Amino acid sequence: MKLPLIISAALLARAAAVQKVCARQSRYNPSFIPRRHHHQVIAAFGNPKYYSNNFIRADKDGAELKVPKFDVFFDELQKVSPLVKQATHEENPGGIAAIDDAADVYKWKNMERHPNRLISQVDKIDNFQNHGVPLIRVRSSLRGPSKQRGIYFSELISTTDLRHKWDATNNIVETIYNAADLDDIKRFQGDKYGEPVMFGVGYVKTKQSVVSPREQMTLCGVQNFPSGASTVWGVELEEDQNHLFLKDQTKRMPRSTSHLFAMTMIPTGEDTFDVEYVLQLDVGGLPGWLLGPVVTETVKKMFRFAEKYCESGFEEGGELAKRLAAFPDDEEESSLRTDEPIDEACVLDENRALLMPP
């Protein structure tokens, strides 16, 4: 799952126009000057508080993957995402309709509220945890098959073919490593956070546009819950994990950072579900007050594409219907069928990039 640098060309053009003003401001406001590393502007990377000193085996190269502190990380996710909290604790979660915004732990600023539209609500917290960029929260309600919903919805941001259909700036979306054995993750996370169905490290690189290419390396996972809910989560890896970068990507780009990411799907009917998308993204060189609208618009773009894609799951020969045909009928099985041939076109991208968030 990957969806981290999701910046629309139109809004980036606006960003470029504004950067001249930003440059002038930085002469007089030292706090406006970003850190530099090897003469490139970057943002601070993964937050140490979310990581343990534990590692699990990766699926190749003898690599090991760092394990998050699940209690610490999911505690934060539950504070910023009511749907994560519902998925984690409730046998029959009520979705968006059951959310009481007055019970929020943090003070959010409501930016949009349209209960009857595809995007029903947008909220933000400026400078969340003093990272200089906003935390964005977007809610939507969709119709789509329940089969493997957590996986197919995560693929909107983690597979090349789908990502390119709504994110024109994306260049590379690739899974670097997956967990060799998901049981290793279960031993560290315990029983509170559902069933891990994906865990790994993904890499994302954007194209040259009005800003230079950016890259990310993110630890991500997908958790399924008994209620039918699913949570896709991600957090930027710390610099001590830079040895995991793709071997053929030797030139380091300015790095973007997903400080916090979660996308949670809650079933609201046989074929309907609510989604809450929470992301704090830092794009080195762009100020937080400009980045907020950019991130929000890109997430909306993803939901607009998702609406049609999810509906195609009910259509004979539909794009999602073909994808779902590649999965086993038994929801407990996490691998693709091996007893019959699979059309390559159906499998969109067998190397499901487990990565970033928009």
Image (cartoon, rainbow, N blue to C red):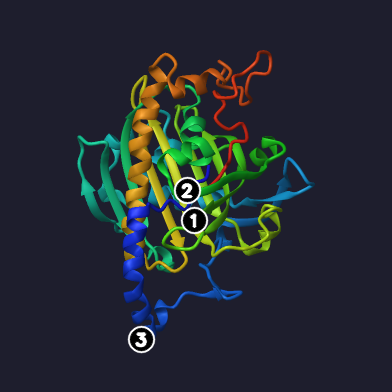
Proximity of marks 1 and 2: CB atoms separated by less than 8 Å: yes
Residue drawn at x 61%, y 26% as measured from the top left: 334
- For badge 3, the amino acid type reads Tyr
Q: Nearer the viewer, residue 200 or 186?
A: 200
Q: In the rendered structure, which disc, 1 or 2, sits on the residue that comes first in sequence? A: 1
Asked if residue 345 is positioned above or below residue 329 in the image, the reply reads below
Query: Label for residue 357?
Result: 2
| Residue 72 seen in render | no
Asked if residue 222 is positioned above or below residue 210 in the image, the reply reads above
Circle 1: element type: strand
Question: Which corner quadrant of the image does residue 32 belong to?
Answer: bottom left
| Residue 141 seen in render | yes
- For badge 2, the amino acid type reads Pro
The span from disc 3 to disc 2 (Cα, nearest Å) is 33 Å
Circle 3: element type: helix
Locate residue 87, reporting x and y percent: 43, 36
Circle 2: element type: loop
Locate residue 93, reporting x and y percent: 37, 32
- For badge 1, the amino acid type reads Ser
Q: Residue furthest right?
A: 62
Q: Which residue is mark 1?
A: 258
Q: How busy is the neighbourhood of tag 3: few (under 14 within 10 Å), some, or many (20 plus)?
A: few
Q: Which residue is mark 3?
A: 28
Proximity of marks 3 and 2: CB atoms separated by less than 8 Å: no
